[in-house]
Amino acid sequence: MSESAEATPAKPIVQPAAVAQTDDEKTIDTNISPPVAVVRPEENEEYSLKVKPEFILTERSSVLAPIPVAEPAAVASTNKPEAAERKGVGKKKNRGQNRKRPRDPKTADADKLCNAVVRGEECPYEKCRYSHNIKKALADRQPDITGVEGGCPNFNLTGYCDFGIHCRLGSEHINMATGQNLRKDIVGGSKKKAVLNVLSKEVQSQLRRKKYPFVCKRHFERDNKDNSGTQTKTGDDERARNSPKPGALIKQKEEQDSAEESIALPSADGPAFDLTPLPATRKLIDFSNKVYVAPLTTVGNLPFRRIMKKFGADITCGEMAIGSCLLQGQNSEWALMKRHPDEDIFGVQVAAGFPDQFTRVSELLESQCTVDFVDVNMGCPLDIVCNKHAGSALMLRDKKLRESLEGMSRTLTCPFTVKMRTGWFDEKPIAHLLVPKIQSWQIDGLNAVMIHGRSRLQRYSRQANWDYIAQVSKAQSTDLPKIPVIGNGDIFSYQDYEEKVKREGVEATAMLARGALIKPWLPTEIKERRDWDISATERLEILKEFVRFGLEHWGSDQQGVNNTRRYLLEWLSFLYRYMPVGMLEEGVSQAMNARPPRNLCGRSDLETLMLSSNCQDWIKISELLLGPCPDGFRFEPKHKANAYKAAS
């Protein structure tokens, strides 16, 4: 982000701390005394978070990396319409900020050492596309990363590292003369806990070949049969294109609600799919007085959830998974189903737009995974999701929603929940109409409704409307069993939690999202009812533990290190928003979207670095933990929130 120029530039208030340099890392002094007081610049009056004057400088701290200057956009060199059209000038560009995000370079197969050779075995293939030259692999091997305390996590937990010579922490388990991958005995056996919900290769192959024996029939198997009995297949993408768009659905729903029409009941022929109820007792989840870490795209990964469990989270949920991708057996989507044994109450979230998708995914989860609940996503605001009638768009399709929930009820033995927003538009909320409808359907197994107090178009800007969440809960009929309503949005302290859940009808559940990303120790604050002035050193220890968990989960080879670094940087794009309690003016607490002043200086150089919104400073933190970045490394955060803007 760019900085506005000062009228009279001043010299830095503090000089950078002495930095000891090694070959692969820089150590930052964390015990620097705070700077002397300065006058708050007039430019900072627009910011809402009140910070003590002694931590505000007149210009950017010299500890931080300089902010890069944006290059001017290229200008077409011709005025001819034909040439402009050929070059794409003037055409509507594809939307999406992540189309050209930087990616890590991939190593050619010929430069990778064969896994059989790594294990010390003979390669079973006559024409193997991988290298078998151990001496070359040893000569080309990069130096070990020295920032990870304890060395290779997998070797320490199991006594053996599967990555062998490829391990970036392998000096303790590699014979550097021969390349042999060594073993060691672990007292009491392996201490590594096996990750759950790993899809077998056989089932994945069946899904990819569309040979998995689903009970629920697809839409074209039920509806699109000609006189000869043959089936006409319609893909999910084509089905989404042929269905009414969200704009048309909004108009239909407004007409329906104004005329007080109810949803169509099932036909006399029964449900659209034939499923036999499972003979099992469904155990509901008690969400009351618990801390629940909501599904968080990209950053809510398994290593992050392990961090949250250590700070007292009671319930965790995996990242949003797209139902159609799960049904295709995609590795990237099934990775979101993985569960660590430390997650004692764990759920998964699924986004889909059609009942057969939800039901078939439920069949897979029931047979292939161990989960405590399944969450239906009706809150994702992204166009790519809503255009397929999933996410927030599903709120506009009552019939599809009902059939989806009924299919899940017949398929799952675990309970399921629904997470929605207040509606599509800010000024026309519909949750107070939709939740009573869901209640009237009396669907067995529906455990709770989670409501994010913002509309789809609002996304994450402005404050969540908790008064409306309470209104939705009170809109339910008193003649039917009430569905627990859990609120979500802007819980950033224990005071926020207590103030928001005191409303009548709102469950006493601390459902955390961005608050957990910015303050992972928030569950501890809520349970102990205190504001934790956590030090920069303690926060660095949290990041070190995340790195260990990441290398254990994604691997300790170069690809695993790259993945760990990327996810660490994504998390740092949220962590910098935390303002230490000791730097705030007396009586001031930080709100979720409150913006701090520019040119902040922490109580130590490390704290100053952690307050920076510059990607280059996040990369510097990652290098403290994972060693130098590869040549040409670039990073851009995936999530760029308009609700929070601050200049470093």
Image (cartoon, grey):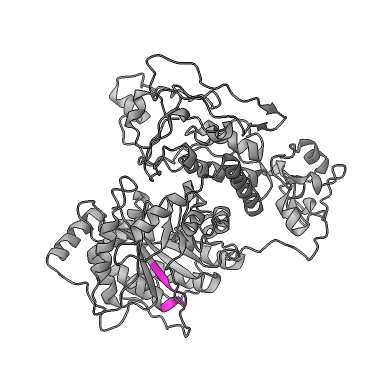
**Residue at the bottom extreme?**
279
Residue at (70, 61) in percent of width and height: 192
**Closer to us: 455 or 412:** 455
The answer to whether 226 appears left or right of 606 in the picture is left
The answer to whether 380 appears left or right of 531 in the picture is left
Q: Within the image, what quadrant is residue 39 found in? A: top left
Q: Is residue 398 visible?
A: no
**Closer to us: 639 or 151:** 151
Magenta-drawn segment:
410-417
**Closer to us: 57 or 191:** 57
Residue at (19, 72) in percent of width and height: 262
Task: Where is residue 18? Give x, y as percent.
Answer: 65, 25
Task: Where is residue 404? Give x, y as percent.
Answer: 35, 70
Q: Is residue 567 above or below residue 279?
A: above
Task: Where is residue 492? Give x, y as percent.
Answer: 42, 50
Q: Is residue 260 visible?
A: yes
The answer to whether 406 appears left or right of 431 in the picture is right
Q: Quadrant of the C terminus?
A: top left
Task: Where is residue 184? Give x, y as percent.
Answer: 83, 56
